[in-house]
Amino acid sequence: MNGGGVKHWTLHLALIAVLFSAQFWLSPYHATNLARIMILAVFAMGYNLAFGYTGLLSLGHALFLAAGMYAAGLPAQLWGWTAGPVFIAGIAGGGLIAAALGLLALRTAGVSFMIVTLMFAQAGFLTLLYFAPVTGGDDGFAVAASSRTLMGFDLSTDTPRFLAALVIFGTGLLLSLALVRSAFGRTMVAMRENEERSRMLGYNPFSVKLAALTISGLYAGAAGAAYAILFGYVGASFATIQYSILPMLYVLLGGAGTTLGPLLGAALMFVLIEAATGLTTAHQFIVGAALVTLVLFAPKGILGTVRERWVRWLP
Amino acid sequence: MAFGPFLLLALMEGLVTAAVLALAAAGLSLVFGVMRVVNVAHGEFYMLGAVLAWVVTTMIPGPPALAFLAAIVIAPLLVAALAAAADGLILKRLNYDPEATIVATIGLLYILQQAALSLYGPNANPVTAPFEWRIQLPWFGYSGYKLFVVLAAGLVLLGLWLFMTRTKAGLIMRATQVDRMTAQAFGINVDRVYMGTFALGAGLAALAGVLIVPIQQAQYLMGHDPLLLSFIVVIIGGLGSLRGTLIAALVIGLSDGVISMFFTPTLAKILATLLVAMVLVFRPQGLFGAKS
C-alpha cells in the first residue's frame, strides 16, 4: 500500500488533467453533466471513506448531503452570504451532523448501525418537511444569483461552473489519496478488517470510526454545498433515502476501497441511466437490478476486481 | 365534537393502524428472527398485496364480498410465491450474509416498485369493501369494515401464534431460529425452512395490504410508510420476538393515531423514528426483548 507513491500521484494527477481537458472537447451539455458527475463523485468518495475503507455501511448519508446543502442554502437565502462563506458553511454542516450522528450511531455496529443511520436520516428528512416554510419542503428553493458568484466569477455559467466542480473534485480526490496512504488511512482499514485485533494493538475503534465518519460527512457536506451553489437548487428531496442508496451504489459499482472507484461508479451509473432514457423510463429498475447484480456477482466492483486480478498497486 | 369522543375516534383509528401494522411487522419479525435477514423490500410485498387485490377484484365479477374473498386468498399466495422465488434466486446465493442481503433487498425494493409503476400505473385505485355496515355510536358513525380489519388481523395473529407454538412446522422453524447448524445436523432442510419463512413473512405483509386496501387506495408508493413503521415496531418490540412485536404495534399504532389527529402525521413519524434510533442505540434488545 505504501509503495508506488510516484505511480499513485501520477495516475491521479493525470486523471485530473484529463478531466480538465474535457471542457475543450465536450459539448457544453456534456461538460455540465460531467460537472454534476464530479460533484456526485465527491459525495461517493466521502461514502467510500466510511464504507470502503472503514467498513461502516451507512444508510444515512443523505442526511449529511442535505446538511451541507441546507447549511449552504439557508445562509444564502436568509442573509445573502456569498459563495465562499456559503461553501465553507456547507462543509462544516455536513461534518458537524456526521460527528453528532456518529457519537450515537457508532455505539452500534453492522445491521443495527445501518438501521440507526437510516432512522436518523429519515427523521432528518421529515424534519425538513415539518419546517417547510423555512426549508421549502419537497419543492425546495432556488439559490439567489448573488450567492453563486465567487471573486467576480458567475458560477452559474458553464466554464466557471465546470472549473469549480473540477477544483472541488480534484482537491477531494488528492486529499482522499493522501488520507488512505497515511498511517491513519491504514488504521481505518484495520477497523474494517479486524476491529478486535486493532483494539488489542492499542487503537480506539470508536474514535477512529468517529473521525472517519466525520471526514465522510465533510465530503458529503462539500458535495451538498457545491450542488446548491453550482446548480442553484436546494430541496428536501436530497434528504430522501434514495440519496443514501446512490453513493452506496456508485461505490459498489466502481469498487469499494479504491480511490478512483467512486468517480467511475458515478460516471457509469449516470451514463447508464442517460442511455436508458431513450429506451425506457424505468430508472429505478436499472438502479435495483444494478444493486442486485453487483451484490450477487461482483461484490468487489470494477476497480476492486481490476486490482485483484491485474493491477496490484492500484490505491 | 367534544374531546372525549374525539379521543375515542383517534384511538379507534389507531387500533386499525395497529392491527394492520401488527400483521406486516409480524412478517418482518419472523423473517428477521428465523433467517437473520433484514428485508428492506417488505413494504413492497405489502404494496403488491394491495395492488393484486385491486387486480383480482376487478377481474372477478359478482358481488364485492365474493371478489374480496378471492383477493384475500389469491393475493397473499401470489406474493408468497414471488418471495420464495426471490429467496431462491438472490438471498440463498448470498448465503444470507446480513449486510449483503440488505443491499440486495434494497435492489429488490426498487425493482418491485418500478414493476408496479410500469404495469399498474401511477394512479391510486379503490377497492370496494366487502360490506357496507356502519356502526352508529352516540357521537359518530363508524365503518364496520374497519372493525372487521381489527378482528381479522387478531385472528390471523392468533393463528400464527398457534402455528409457531403448536405445530411441527412451527417447531422446526423455531429450532432453525435457535441454531441453524444443529437443526441442519438433525436432518432439517434449512434451505426449505428459509424459503418457507420468507414466503410466510411476505404473505403476511401482502395480507395486511389486502385488508387495508378498501380503506386506503392501492398505489405503487404505499409500501414506504408500512416499511418504516414495521421496522420501528419490530425494533421496539425486540427483534424476533412475536409478543413484543404485537405490544409495540399497539403502542405505535395507537400513539400514531392520537398524535396524528391532534398534531400532524409528520410530527408523529419524526418522534417515532427518533425513538427507534434511540432504542437501538441504548437498548438494542428492544424495550420488551430479553437481554441476550
Image (cartoon, coloured by chain):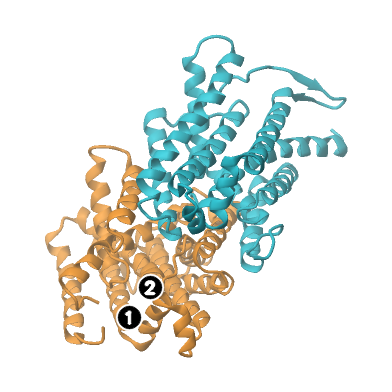
Chain colours: A orange, B cyan
Q: Amino acid at mark 2?
A: Leu
| Same chain for the residues under marks 1 and 2 in the image | yes
Q: Element under label 1?
A: helix
Pick out the residue farthest to the front.
B186
Q: Element under label 2?
A: helix
Q: Amino acid at mark 1?
A: Val
Pick out the residue farthest to the left.
A25
Residue at point 57%, 43% (across, down):
B27
What separation in Å lies between label 1 and label 2 (alpha carbons)?
8 Å
Asked if residue A240 shows in the view, the reply is no
Which mark identifies residue A49?
A: 2
Asked if residue B85 shows in the view, the reply is yes
Q: Are marks 1 and 2 in contact (CB under 8 Å)?
A: yes
Q: Determine which residue is flagged by label 1.
A: A180
Residue at point 47%, 29% (across, down):
B123
Residue at point 14%, 68% (across, down):
A21
Q: Position of residue A101 (x, y in %)?
A: 55, 69
With B182 as the anchor, is B19 left or right in this view? Answer: right
Q: Position of residue B28 (x, y in %)?
A: 56, 47
Q: Position of residue A10 (x, y in %)?
A: 16, 81
Q: Quadrant of the N terminus of chain B?
A: top right
Mark 1: few, some, or many residues within 10 Å (few <14, many ≥20)? Answer: many
Pick out the residue farthest to the bottom.
A202
